[in-house]
Amino acid sequence: MSFTLTILGSNSAAPTSERNSSSQLLDCGKGGSILLDCAEGTQIQIRKFKLRLLNIDRILITHLHGDHFFGLPGLLTTWHLLGRKKELNLYAPAELENLLNHIFTVSGAQLCYPIHFHAVDTTKHQCIYENKTISIQSLPLVHRMPCCGYLIQEKPGELKIIKEKVIEYQLGFGQIRDLKAGLPVTLDNGTVVLPEMATLAPSPPVSYAYCTDTAYSEDLIPLISGVHTLFHEATFMDQEQKLAGEKFHATARQAGSIARQAGAKHLLIGHFSSRYKALDGLLAEARTEFQETTLAQDGLKIEIR
Amino acid sequence: MSFTLTILGSNSAAPTSERNSSSQLLDCGKGGSILLDCAEGTQIQIRKFKLRLLNIDRILITHLHGDHFFGLPGLLTTWHLLGRKKELNLYAPAELENLLNHIFTVSGAQLCYPIHFHAVDTTKHQCIYENKTISIQSLPLVHRMPCCGYLIQEKPGELKIIKEKVIEYQLGFGQIRDLKAGLPVTLDNGTVVLPEMATLAPSPPVSYAYCTDTAYSEDLIPLISGVHTLFHEATFMDQEQKLAGEKFHATARQAGSIARQAGAKHLLIGHFSSRYKALDGLLAEARTEFQETTLAQDGLKIEIR
């Protein structure tokens, strides 16, 4: 399996005409479609990049600074206008639930689809959701207000059956199912077929960690150890390390350092300060710590596999 | 004087990739810069059309459906991030004040500039603001929730002094001031100069009426009689007149009819339903009632004079 990630916004704080504020769409295939944060303009970005607006099953909000959730009332209302029927699961710090209810009361919105609100304890590292295909964990972060990242992991897949062996051993449906599940099967002629005789190992599971907003914190490293792709905020360049610390943000070099220490395969950096018109400097700086770094710019689409 | 109007959003309800939801910027020169409604994405549209974000003095909100104010929290927060010092005057139905306070509390925003909230009684036709140059009146509209439009009028200007007459009569500063104010002056030689002998009539004052959302209502006509430019919503075409009535919206033909009966010089139509990809039909229909009609499409900039 693979996850398909699209960056909807890469700027910190206020949007610019080139860079919207924080939001990303992670399509986990059978595992569902997940929106990570929802800045103002997110629904417009989803349309602009021709993604499937109604496909989203789950929204994960990291924290309640406006540049991470001010697009939520509009998106939820638009789904009502489009006649959405599918339930929506929303994960966020508890205070958001009352606020959304207040907004809907004032704006006269009565949504035609069910929303299940899940209050996330941002101080805990725990599984907040799982289905047959994926699991989602909260990752406590260090910011000016309660904030957590999210780790989305594919579950280990089944063994892959070798087609030629199905013919050779004349395997039936039940026998294939057992072999894929790692169980031996006995043929009519008494031959025992072990899983390793008729199957290949599954694809290694993919994983994505979305870590924003946060100061540099080594406490994060064991929680995302071995992650395939890490998104880590890089609001500033290292020259502004003092300012970054004061504002509980990280620098590009620090993001690279976390990726290296966590043994990630790939690093995406984003949540850039508006002061950086060109982003080459941030990229170069992160790469001094971790070569496999990419700028998470608006519209970037990558397959995580 | 002239007013400069820029359309920031022309769609009803949900934004599309071509048309944002309701917002317009009216630059009244010395009278100030006024934002009319503030849909999600308004701050992004202001940047896109290269307008002066920090110039806005006043925001007028017609009603509290989300497509008319969901961009407000983001815009107000961005001003804080940009270090705005100038006070902001916000006119809207009363419930918005508590809601904004709730949003700011949850999102940890403490604005660095003063906001003066003015609760507007949408049922009353009254002057809600005036300065030396302009006045603003509320215009009760007929919608599913309390809603009013706004009439922004330039005040009649002073008489214009004729330069040649200043030389001919050797007029001093105080005499010019009196003549421009419509008062006669007596020269040293005893000659009385009447205002009509040394001045021209001022430019006719301009006015703009912003009327959305509303069902067709002839009660509006006397309130905007003789207006220079009228914006009237035209969510639907006349074929959908029944639906328009049920949803308390107007059709393009009805908008044209209001403009004709009010004796407007110019009509702008907007707040288009997403069902209309092309807008030619709406324009043609409004023009059957009122020839001087223009589509208020995103990015349109017009001088009202």
Image (spheres, coloured by chain):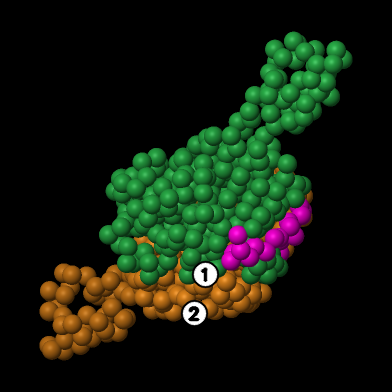
Chain colours: A orange, B green
Is residue B262 at least partly visible in the picture? yes
- Span highlighted in magenta in the image: B107-125
Please give the name of the residue rendered at 30% of the width and 84% of the height, measured from the top-left corner: A183
Q: If the image is split into quadrants, where does the N terminus of chain A sit? A: bottom left
Indicate the secondary structure of the residue bearing disc 2: strand
Q: Nearer the viewer, residue B245 or B221?
A: B221
Callout 2: few (<14), some (14-19), or many (20+) C-alpha neighbours within 10 Å? few
Please name the predominant secondary structure of the magenta segment in the image: loop
Q: Is residue B199 left or right of residue A268?
A: right
Residue B82 image point, x, y percent: 70, 46
Is residue A255 at least partly visible in the picture? no
Locate residue B175: give its quadrant: top right
Residue B168 image point, x, y percent: 74, 10
Please give the name of the residue rendered at 87% of the width and 15% of the height, measured from the top-left corner: B188
Q: Nearer the viewer, residue A42 or B27?
A: B27
Residue A250 image point, x, y percent: 67, 54
Name the chain under label 1. B
Q: Which residue is mark 1?
A: B145
Amino acid on which the number 1 mark rests in the picture: Met
Name the chain under label 2. A
